[in-house]
Amino acid sequence: MSGSKQKIAILGGGLAGLSTAYWLSQSPDAQKKFEITIYQQGWRLGGKGASGRNLAPGQGDRIEEHGLHIWFGFYENAFRTYRQVLESLRDVPEPKPATFTDWRQAFAQHSLVVLGDNGRDGLEQWPILFSRNDREPGLGQHPSDWGMFVEALQLGMNFFEGRFGDDNEIEEFLERFALPSWATQMIWRGEKFLRRNVLRGIHKMASLLPQDARTRNPSQELALAAALEGFRGTARGVLRHRVDKSVRARRIYRMTDLLATVGIGILRDGLLYRGFESVDHIEFRQWLRRHGADAEQTLDCNFTRVLNDLMFGYVGGNETQPNIAAGTAARIMLLAVSGYDGSFMYKMKSGMGDTIFVPLYALLKARGVRFEFFQRVDKLHANDDGQIETIDLTRQVKLKAATKAHGGYQPLHRVGNYDTWPATPDFDQIVNGSKLAKDPHNPGQPYNLESSWTAWPNAGCYSLQRGKDFDLVVNTIPVAALEKIGADLIPRSRTFQRMFEGDARIATTRTQAMQLWLNHSAADMGWRVPERMRQAEAEGLAAPLLGGYFQPFNTWCDMTQVLGEEHWGGVAEPASISYFCGQLPDDPDEAPTTDHGYPARQLQVVRDTGRNWLSNVGPVLWPKVGDPLSEYGIRPDALFAPDGAEAFSAQYFRANIDPSERYTLSLAGTTASRPPPHCPEFQNLFFAGDWTYNPVLNAGCVESTVASAMAASRAICGFPQHIEGEQKKTA
């Protein structure tokens, strides 16, 4: 270790890098112990969560995201970190950063999820409104794994009683089909038995068992599994004859069968004490089949489909090859259904860059963390003693003398009341900035310094030296980009070999996104929620969020809540904003990085896909503005665009094709290939990111990212000791 402080080089300024820096800086005596530098390619922080403000004239300072970002209510460690960051910012000396000051200011509660449902008449819409609870995210209030399991049983009991156990509905059903008296009596008895006896008994049995897996006898869980199997069989007998005659019955059948099967699998495979990853070698649908799921109704129902969409869980982005590791899928379901605090979901009230990364950047800078923007990491080299010895980097631009004198690159731009991240670099701070602003390979756009295909001539290469520039390295650069950066380490490291070689290597996928600014609200365009959800709609809890829908833009979310942070300033302003996202199939003919026009061509693919998709699906989503003669499927005047701009091309599209942008998949058989927080072959190398192994959830999401950062910080300095939701295996 050089000097009195340990020098830590964090490679990558996404959420993993920033969260690692936060927890290291939060540790006791951090100011005396650590000197932290974050190296970031391009001009902004955030990685796959980065957003930018379009500052061009007539663009309303609009928010442009990499994709759709929504926080689930079970993101306990993420909310804990965010709340602490905002609280710590209150003690930062003046001038204080212009950002959110309270997490409630930054997030809006969301409770409605609409699922695409395969019905007799094609894909239908099934709205599900999740109830709120009294817990708050980030305070460590949500229950243990067993507590969540018991709560899930309670929710299942409430759902079955309240949604299908209505006596009037049953009576109407019986009258409609004029069944024989003996059949009528059996249905009545079956309904009442299920409602009043079976589920209540199962829930009571579960609630009496010890919470701590170490004190529970596995035979008790097997007995509970047998009881759930009995319930599932009885439910099938009561409901099966209605599946083809009633939409509601079909939905309840599928939900009951899936959730009961997941519960049976959790208990029979001992996941609550062996760990959920113990069955991650099995694909989720295979695992469901093994535990008796209805092959016809359940294996490819809307619930399983939406889980794949949520996790972009398709091999190579191919919708015909769904694949999620069974344990990871089961854990997500358990956390999402019964582990949420307050609301099922939370939507940010501004872009993720503004909401999350501005406060993180401001606090870390106030704590003395150095930020080196425009630094591309090229290669890691190790010595014979098992230490990362040098790190090769490329300096992408030269900064003007005045910028250097001011303390280096200043990345933020004030929009309204808040500091924000611009969608392009501040060219005035950069030598030859006017040239950087005009990319001949992408007319009308600047050179993209976040792209591997950029033609921009870099400002030179250099190397960081162990003992001089760093002592420890924390790599947070995503796994798809790390393969090239760590190529020299692969022959020397079993950890690297598992990541990048063989059938169990960590897989990733490309994604695509589309943002539409609209002249009407979703309701005015024909979107409706059921009457029973109107109160939730009035409270702002039931804006559209639709999943499991038509491919490839299988997820739609109304993001109108961010309009208050955009500033159009003209006579006409958009009335709503819709975000769409989905997987982007891999290109077997992906061009080499010397083909500088490749990103523009792929972006055109996304535009064309979006146009075709909207022409087919738009009239279904928004029937009041449907127009069969329009190339968009909806009236062109439904799309908001600045004066003189073509309506569709004026919207925002993303082709996330760069290695650092690819989404990490949770394919069956790959969990064991994820690296631990500390690389065992190289003493001074650590990992953080949603592609690493962490004890909470091995999936591509904010919570996994933050949990991995906490684990990396703990591996370095022992802090934080506690990570919420950490699985403690007993076998």
Image (tube, rainbow, N blue to C red):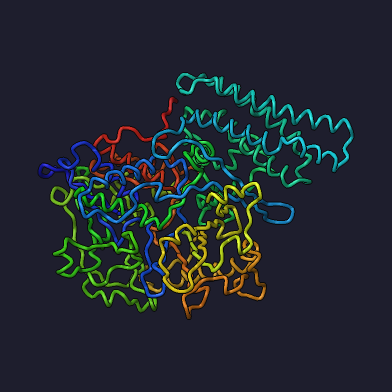
In the rendered image, the quadrant that contains the N terminus is top left
Q: Position of residue 619 (x, y in %)?
A: 64, 66
Compare residues 369 and 440 and report the one nearer the observer.
369
Left or right side of 43 for 266: right
| Residue for point 37% across, 65% down | 53
Compare residues 206 and 354 and report the one nearer the observer.
354
Q: Is residue 654 visible?
A: yes
Left or right side of 571 for 169: right
Q: Position of residue 106 (x, y in %)?
A: 40, 51
| Residue for point 38% across, 77% down | 444
Locate residue 462: give its quadrant: bottom left
Q: Is residue 494 visible?
A: no
* 256 to 431, vertically: above or below: above
| Residue for point 58% across, 61% down | 522
Q: Position of residue 238 (x, y in %)?
A: 76, 34
* 96 to 186, vertically: above or below: below
Locate residue 54: give its quadrant: bottom left
In the rendered image, the quadrant that contains the C terminus is top left
The residue sitting at the left extreme is: 3
* 102 to 645, vertically: above or below: above
Q: Position of residue 548 (x, y in %)?
A: 59, 52
| Residue for point 51% across, 71% down | 640
**Image label count:** 0
